[in-house]
Image (cartoon, rainbow, N blue to C red):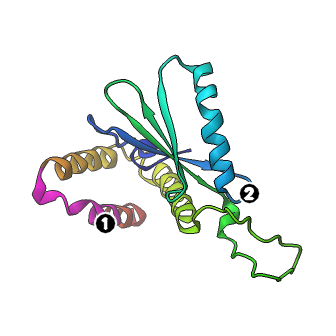
Amino acid sequence: MRVGVLAKGLLLRGDKNVNLVLLCSEKPTQSLLTRIVEHLPKQLTVVTQDKYEVSSSAEEAAIILMSGTEPKMQVTITLTSPVIREESVREGDVTSGMVKDPADVLDRQKCLDALAALRHAKWFQARANGLQSCVIIIRILRDLCQRVPTWSPFPGWVSISLRRQIEWE
């Protein structure tokens, strides 16, 4: 699923990095990440003739896909699962049939951050995407923040303020 500026329709000319979230039915593991990175290049050749570099980052719980041609584009695919919200079962605790986490489960916080990014994208699509002027204003502000150094601290504050303003309307 698309998240971040890609999901919100806020891409600007020159944006070369986008984010996706891959929802798994179970907690994502290092071995799953490795299997995907091994098989993805073969699957990409089925759908396109373009060349891509595929790598993984266990620290980021992500697959990184780089285009082989100019302009270099990067897609970061973070693995997560809704079951990652559940607290890990303690060693030796066997309550309600829960199974202990695999030893190579990916970083819980990175997976939770990916779930939060999904919630943010869904909220934006439900609340703000219908307000055309809101999307245009956010694009203008993003552009200002990228081009004018004085505006660079502004993005975090703006997203909170705009979210509150939209909720009040």
Answer left or right for 117 relative to 73. Answer: right
Tell me which residue sits at (58%, 29%) in the image.
41
Quadrant containing the N terminus in the rendered view? top right
Q: Tag 1: residue type? A: Ser
Q: Which residues make up the magenta segment?
A: 148-161
Answer left or right for 16 relative to 34. Answer: left
| Residue 155 forms part of the magenta stretch | yes
**Front one among 159 and 146:** 146
Residue 123 x/y as whole percent:
50, 56
**Front one among 34 and 8:** 34
Give residue 143's quadrant in the image: top left
**Residue, disc 1:** 161
| Residue 47 forms part of the magenta stretch | no
Q: Which mark is residue 26?
A: 2
Residue 44 x/y as whole percent:
58, 26
Residue 36 x/y as whole percent:
64, 41
Q: Which mark is residue 46?
A: none
- The local crowd at label 2, few if under 14, some if 14 to 19, many if 20 or more residues have their Cα within 10 Å, is few
